[in-house]
Amino acid sequence: MSVHNRRVSEPVRVLLLHMPQLLRGMLEEAVQTHDDCLLLKHSGRVFAALTERMSTPDIVVLGIAAAEDATLVPALFARWPRAQVMTVMQTGDDAAAYELRPRRIALGQMSPAEIVDKLLELAYRGRELSQEG
């Protein structure tokens, strides 16, 4: 079943952190084109977002400069253990998904629309797993 045809009772909550304004704008636009996504508002800074009161995200997207810069991923899981975390290169040309297990899934180059499709797929899978457990 296509992600676009699949609906859930509540929208997938997406939090974008630490990325250049151009990339943020492209991802915000891509997220907002999906009725089943809700973009969470925050101050824009990673460490502030870790302490701000906000809805719990289903997906956290973290902008990084290099694959080795994903050192904040454990802190994101510590704050939101049920969330899926995706890193996106700040150049916008590479992405990876993390789960609390933790493990890294290389996703390669993706367009903003492909990133949102992957975000939704991860959120749906995470919800299904938490309902089983």
Image (cartoon, rainbow, N blue to C red):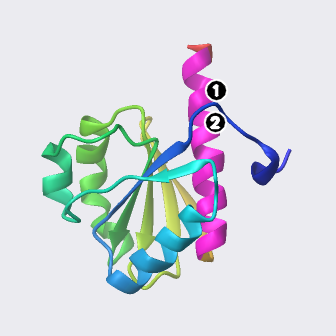
- Please say if 9 is above or below 11: above
- The quarter in which the N terminus is drawn is top right
CA distance for labels 1 and 2: 5 Å
Where residue 125 is drawn, which disc sits there? 2
Tell which of 57 and 105 is nearer to you.
Answer: 57
Q: Residue at x 50, y 62 (%)?
A: 96
Whether residue 116 sits left or right of residue 26 in the image: it is: right
Disc 1 residue type (three-letter): Glu
Q: Secondary structure at mark 1?
A: helix
Please provide the residue range marked out in magenta.
112-131
- Residue 24 falls in which quadrant of the image? bottom left
What residue does disc 1 label?
Answer: 128
Tell which of 92 and 30 is nearer to you.
Answer: 30
Q: Position of residue 63 (x, y in %)?
A: 35, 70
Where residue 44 is drawn, which disc sits there? none
Q: Residue at x 62, y 77 (%)?
A: 111
Q: Secondary structure at mark 2?
A: helix
Whether residue 74 sits left or right of residue 101 in the image: it is: left
Q: Residue at x 32, y 68 (%)?
A: 68
Q: Residue at x 42, y 41 (%)?
A: 102
